[in-house]
Amino acid sequence: MTGSSEVLHQTPSLSSQGALVLEAWKALGSDVGSSEVPWRQDLTQDFARGWPSAREEAWKYSPIAKLQESSLRPLADELRFELPEGVQACRMSAASGVVLDRVRDLMKISPAHRFNALAWLSDPWVVFVPRGVSPQAPLRVHAPRGEVNAWSCAGWLLVVDEDARLNVVEQYGAQVGALSWGTRMFLGSGSRVEHLRMQGAGVEAWGFAESIALVSENAHYVQVQVSTGGKMCREDADVRLQGGGGQAHLDATFMARNEQVLDHRTSIEHEVGDTQSHQLYKGLLADRSRGIFNGRVLIRRDAIGANAAQLSQNLLLSPTAEINTKPELQIDADDVKAAHGAAVGQLDKEHLFYLRSRGISEAKAKEVLLLGFALEALRGLQDAELMRVGRAWIETEANVLLTERDTSLGAEASRTSGSAT
Amino acid sequence: MSAAAAEKPVLLEVTDLHVNVQDKPVLKGLNLVVRAGEVHAIMGPNGSGKSTLSKVIAGHPDYEIVSGRIRFEINFQMRDLLELEPDQRAKEGVFLAFQYPIEVPGVSNRSFLRTSYNAICKHQGTEALSDAAFDQYLKSKMALVEMDEKFLDRGVNVGFSGGEKKRNEILQMAVLSPRLALLDETDSGLDIDALRIVANGVNKLKSRHNAIVMVTHYQRLLDYITPDFVHVLADGKIVETGDNSLALKLEEKGYDWLL
Ligand SMILES: Nc1ncnc2c1ncn2[C@@H]1O[C@H](COP(=O)(O)OP(=O)(O)OP(=O)(O)O)[C@@H](O)[C@H]1O
Ligand SMILES: [Mg+2]
């Protein structure tokens, strides 16, 4: 491995975690696959700074102070695939030809979370769907489950060739410790990917996930993020619409309770015109939990006729729950459509009354409405299996949210008017 | 008619009802008696309190009952309806077809209908239907209102046209077969065919055990569903009651002669 020991010498002020990451990197042995990672040299600087600090802009609102004190040991970990028929996989170091070209495009992008670099430097798997292939079954991806005192890092890449289709179900979240999870994909022209991400970390676990999608002309990317677990989990989704007719749906439901913090950052770049993006982020926040949605949309100068819509809707189920929602629209082109909106509230009392007027009890009506609110994030899915899996997950979690508490939600909406005198 | 009517049991009795909305009096001493088997039409100027009356009967929380009472026959006894929660009223057979049906995103029409139907069955002590049996039952009701099945898997009223929403209200009514159906301008915004279909649905529900109260602005509906009584509600009170000929007179002369 060129220069990793040299690197250590160059960074005298290396923080303890930084040293741990470098050590882990060194322990990977030979320089597997990392020559495809153009930013690996910059990492030395990054690692030197250790885990991110709340003083850094991108982390200002993520409560990670505790994490800095932790002594979690970085670990390049393994994931598990269930590959559908017709879909291939190899290590990054074995990629060649067109797949390698795409891998290189994908690896030009520095990780949103620098400590996830370990995943990308440890020769990750590359999944390839050849041209026109469209398997019936979804690709299932199981992330590592975490280890005590460990910070597991894993990631994988997906290259979907022209006119191919793939449905992906990712289930991730450490049960203990922390997990860095990365997914990078390339969608060839005319392809379609439906991508269901289910984050179900353990109550004491940390999570940092990034997803990147490069979308070519006439390709359609649908991401549905369902986040429910963890002490503090952050998701960064980065989508780049690089060809005319390209479309992205980025929808999510997050459900938080107790003192949980669920932090979602999205970035959609319309690099060319005639591209569309739709975002619907739905937060359900109970107890003293906190949700964050930061949605960045960038429409580049030449992206004439781009259309971007973003909506953040949130239900606060307790007076101590909190949501920070912030759109960041940067529009450099003329003649584009960009809309955004954010709503924070309780259950709508007209909705409640409508259901109750049909004989549905107040408690049941709330349950039905909450579930309906959360299920809307599945709107972009066409695949029945993804729909079923996503629905089941949301139903289970919505139930937990309702049965373990109640009373306060939509409280003032529930009383019937005074009695006759 | 009045001699025969007297023998029929009273289903709903509204007595000297005064209702405020945000401290403003809207109903100002309203009286109404509805007997089983009857069809009542309520007409009246915009803003006179027709929807307020329907919503108060259904139990909407926004209205303050200042005085008066509403009684409803439950198990052969007249009971104070105002003591019941909205869902309990529905379980006892009160149904309101909304003037402006609410859109409920994320909740499919099918599961909404099933939840509602099963809740009411449970209350009435009958077994809830299995999903398959309910779908079968639902099919027959869909046919009645000539509604396409694709509406079942969409969110409740979400993206429905004005007329489709009204038809969906009638579907709900058909599924729940209430004893007292309050139809608040269900005929507004319907095309000729839809009006016939909706009227047909209402006529199918009609029996000597239940009653229908229709709020309408148009005589047209009454060509399809003949009311036993036509009331004029103006400024929070019933100011005139007659038979179907009153509706014709209103169509011709408007309300001025009554006010
Ligand atoms: N929730 C409310 N908030 C404020 N004012 C209300 C509310 N509901 C009713 N009102 C007022 O009460 C009065 C009666 O309204 P209502 O809807 O009962 O009239 P209506 O007879 O049904 O009229 P229309 O024929 O136009 O449907 C109106 O002046 C209306 O503005
Ligand atoms: Mg009205």
Image: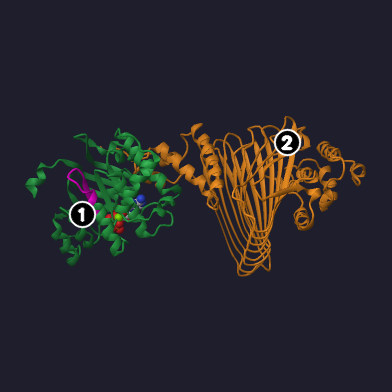
Chain colours: A orange, B green
Are labels 1 and 2 assigned to the same chain? no
Query: Is B141 within the magenta?
Result: no
Spot the residue most to the top: A148
Q: Position of residue A288 (x, y in %)?
A: 57, 36
Q: Nearer the viewer, residue A158 or B91?
A: A158
Chain of residue at mark 1: B
Q: Is residue A81 visible?
A: yes
Q: Is residue A311 above or below residue B123?
A: below
Stretch of the chain drawn in magenta: B203-215
Q: Tell me the element at label 1.
A: strand
Question: What is the three-letter code of the residue carrying label 1?
Answer: Ala
Q: CA distance from mark 1 to mark 2?
A: 69 Å
Q: Is residue A57 visible?
A: no
Q: Quadrant of residue B88?
A: top left
Residue under label 2, please give it.
A67
Chain of residue at mark 2: A
Question: What is the three-letter code of the residue carrying label 2?
Answer: Leu
In this image, B208 relative to B48: left or right? left
Residue under label 1, please give it.
B41
Q: Nearer the viewer, residue A221 or B48?
A: A221
Q: Which mark is residue B103?
A: none
In this image, B2 relative to A166: left or right? left
Spot the residue most to the left: B3
Q: Position of residue A143 (x, y in %)?
A: 68, 39
